Image: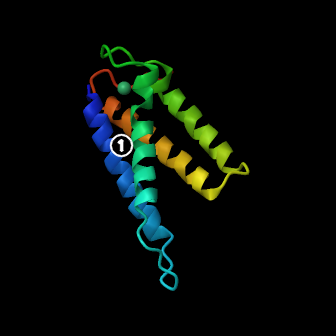
Amino acid sequence: MPDQATHIKVAALTGAALHFINRAATHDPLNPKPFNWGDFLLDVGACTLGGIAADVGEPADTPNHRGFYHSVAGAALAHYAWTKLRGENLSPEAKHLLGVLLAGHVTHLVLDSGTPNGLPLI
Ligand SMILES: [Zn+2]
């Protein structure tokens, strides 16, 4: 099973990649924005937090620690909540951060799904 250091590294790298993808997608050549280290670190931090959150709720003491936070149903519910929150009156930055947080959670599930125990459905 991937250890916490692996979850942190993969989620942090995913957060960094998402930052640059979002930056490229929102780039305006007529009005280029300078690189903002605060935004970058916020994306890396939010994704890392999402990447370790499942093991905070269900500590990885044994390979059989996986409950709802580690399940396909839990991921589907988190995705559903995210899509609902995107429709709410939140700032674009808050919506972006929620998406990055969810992406971190997904990295955790993807890593755990590659183990012999996989992910439970519920
Ligand atoms: Zn886990």
Nearer the observer, 65 or 31: 31
Q: In this view, does 107 lie above or below 60?
A: below
Image coords of residue 108 (percent x, y): 38, 35
Q: Residue at x 73, y 51 (%)?
A: 89
Nearer the observer, 84 or 56: 56
Q: How many marks?
A: 1
Nearer the observer, 34 or 121: 34
Q: In this view, does 70 lie above or below 5?
A: above
Whether residue 74 sits left or right of residue 12 in the image: it is right
Q: Image quadrant of ligand 1?
A: top left
Image coords of residue 7 (percent x, y): 31, 35
The image's colouring method is rainbow
Image coords of residue 49 (percent x, y): 43, 38
Q: Residue at x 34, y 25 (%)?
A: 118
Report the residue that reaches farthest toward the front: 38
Q: Which amino acid does label 1 sit on?
A: Ala
Report the residue that reaches farthest toward the bottom: 30
Image coords of residue 101 (percent x, y): 49, 43
Secondary structure, mark 1, is helix
Q: Mark 1 points at which residue?
A: 11
Q: In this view, does 3 lie above or below 31?
A: above
Work out which quarter of the rendered image holds the N terminus and state it: top left
Q: Residue at x 32, y 49 (%)?
A: 13
Nearer the observer, 117 or 96: 96
- Respond yes or no on whether mark 1 lies under 8 Å from ligand 1: no
Whether residue 112 sits left or right of residue 122 in the image: it is left
